[in-house]
Image: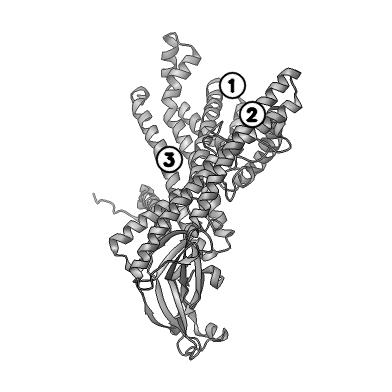
Amino acid sequence: MKQQKPTLKLWFKSGDPWVWLNAAAVALSIIAVIGLLSLLAVKGLSHFWPKPIMQATYELQAGQPQIIVGEHVETAKVSAQQLIDAGFNVDPNQRLHERSLIKVGNRDVFGSDFAWFIDDYLKGIEYPKDLVNLERREWGNFYGEITGLKENGQVVSNTDATPDQLYEDFTKRLDRALSLYDQIHHIEKKAIGSINHKMERLRLKERKLELHPPAADELVKEKQLISDKRAVLDKEYQGLQTELNALYDAVKRDSITAKVSNGQEIEINLSHIVKATQPNKMNFFTKIGAYFHSLWEFLTGDPREANTEGGIYPAIFGTVIMVILMSVMVTPFGVVAAVYLREYAPQGAITRVIRIAVNNLAGVPSIVYGVFGLGFFVYFIGQNVDQVLFEEALPSPTFGTPGLLWASLTLALLTLPVVIVATEEGLARIPRAVREGSLALGATKAETIWRIVLPMASPSMMTGLILAVARAAGEVAPLMLVGVVKLAPSLPVDGNFPYFHLDQKFMHLGFHIYDVGFQSPNVEAARPLVYATAFLLVVVIAVLNIAAVMIRNRLREKYKALEH
């Protein structure tokens, strides 16, 4: 008997095409994810690599050369007709011409950090070793040459000193200025900040006595106590202010004179400089050290210059704290709701309607949750809490304004359906015989659920939490209404009682990406930070998810025997 040859119809019936189609879809998704992460990593992390400073002559008109100094950023092609229409004298027979984007810095001199230059007019490109890159607290980077040092307005640099000796003396004075600046920052943010916090608490306590005065003797005693404490704090403040004034005078002692590419000489106080490098003198290993130093500053520093410079530590901290707080809130509510729907609620029409409603809530746009959180949590609950508990602070709101607590609650509400559905699916997979065996041994239903069912369903609960964290950490729209801000001057956790300030506004990586990418006045400077922050947000979400996955896997191994 002849064996039938396989046909296309039989091949489709076997299901192999669909297996290959699914495999191709998975492979395409993996390639897309890897490609996206690679793009973010390359574009973002390469920003911190020390780039050489070029110097070139740019001659648009004969006899009028212009010296250009800066970092080469990128090269783009532009048509000859566009250049001719813009007034440039280029060869029309050459269809495309190249132009370079150069970061010239010196915004206080040129008005802009970046400028485009036609490559046809760039001549004599070189990389002098004495050029310096000064990262400043304002006005962006300085590119140029250091020509002298001043102390208290008097020139102290030796005219016979070589550029290397001048730069070495400059770095020593810069280290001193940075050390003094750190002391100033500590006094302003920590010491004086703590005193201001205590003074505000005394003011609120005094206001509370005015609203609800006790007996006359007690009132006099309390007011005297407040007055004594305020006097002590005033004395501490005056001492710190004196120390602070001395530090400000000391940190402003030194300055440099430096020459810009157009020949103009400017004076820069060392208190305005964050970091100084000479990238053209660096070897490969020196650049690696500078790269990781810049990356560490990005991860641990505060933002500057409308978030286009400096670090993003407040945004990292705010994102992680919010996600942890959201997880602590959403898990108990989601588990309790799932246990009731699966174990206690009558399985009838009402329960089915509730399940449909929960599933539909998972598809509601996040901005709707933000509007609900603003109206219900902030304006209703928060303002009533202020009336009852913080009457002395009114009309200034305490919880009646967007803050960390309301942002976490809003995201907990947003992710609640995910946790409910995942937990309920885990409860449904637990064999009925396990419950009956526990009940047969004399355990109550509550004991069975608490000691047997919930531990066995914990891997599914963790799955729901993983999905909740993945969604909540990247949300931006609702947070813009309930607590996130462009710049938060202080972290929600500090050394002042009650140490964890749920009423404070905070920064978030997702909103930071939106703000830097779409609201920044300096687009070119913001672009690499958008890539770097986006990559970091993915890393933070991945770390949080990996931690939850590891916990879930341990729980799954622990209760695997009971499932069989």
Figure quadrant of the C terminus:
top left
Residue 228 is labelled as: 2
How far from the left and from the top, in percent, is residue 410? 60, 38
Q: Residue at x 42, y 31 (%)?
A: 459
Residue 346 is labelled as: 1
Is residue 358 visible in the rendered structure shown here?
A: yes
- Of labels 2 and 3, the one closer to you: 2
For the residue labelled by badge 2, is the local secondary structure a helix, a strand or a loop?
helix
Q: Nearer the viewer, residue 18 or 433?
A: 433
Q: Nearer the viewer, residue 552 or 266?
A: 266
- Of labels 1 and 2, the one closer to you: 2
Q: Residue furthest top?
A: 442
The amino acid type found where label 3 is placed reads Asn
The amino acid type found where label 1 is placed reads Pro
Is residue 28 visible in the rendered structure shown here?
A: no
How far from the left and from the top, in percent, is residue 72? 42, 71
- Spatial separation of the CA atoms under disc 1 and disc 2: 64 Å
Label 2 Cα crowd, 10 Å radius (few <14 / some 14-19 / many 20+): few
Q: What color scheme is it?
A: one colour
